[in-house]
Image (cartoon, rainbow, N blue to C red):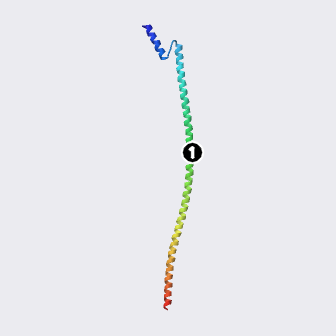
Amino acid sequence: LQKELLKYKQEARNLQGIKVTSPQDALQQRLLQQDAAVLQLKQELLRATMDKEELHNQNVDLQRKVEERNRLLAEYKKELCQKDRHLQQQQTKLDEMLRQLSEASYQQVDLERELEHKEALLAHCMKREAEE
């Protein structure tokens, strides 16, 4: 039974891929496993470093775009302020012209009344002269 047990244990070790015949072999196997784990960690670290660098580059690019947009926004605000001032000046001129037009209109009405009054006086004078 013991021979059979040893045989099955050996077979199980062979199936698992672990053939341990001495403590040195066990250490060798353990070192190989650790080397594989270290290699895997190095690959993950390299991937993480590359991802970090890519994110950093994207961040720099986005910051540049934000700065460019802020610069454009400042220019647009400046232009808008200039246009507002220009519009305000034009509005002031328009108001002044409307006031002058209103005054001219009042003067025209006054002159038309005066003309009508003088025409009426002239007609009255002509009528008197004709009667005399």
Count how many numbered circles sit on residues in the image.
1
Query: Nearest the camera: 131 or 25?
Result: 131
Identify the residue at horizontal 54%, vertical 63% (top origin).
Answer: 92
**On screen, residue 130 above or below 75:** below
**On screen, residue 50 above or below 62:** above
Secondary structure, mark 1, is helix
**On screen, residue 59 above or below 88:** above
Query: Nearest the camera: 29 or 92?
Result: 29
Q: Position of residue 30 (x, y in %)?
A: 52, 18
Residue at the disc numbered 1: 67
Identify the residue at horizontal 55%, vertical 62% (top origin).
Answer: 90
Identify the residue at horizontal 45%, vertical 12% (top origin).
Answer: 9
Q: Position of residue 61 (x, y in %)?
A: 57, 41
Q: Which amino acid is tagged 1?
A: Glu
Q: Where is residue 59 in the image (x, y as percent from the top left)?
A: 55, 39
**On screen, residue 106 above or below 8:** below
Identify the residue at horizontal 55%, vertical 47% (top origin).
Answer: 70
Q: Position of residue 53 (x, y in %)?
A: 56, 35
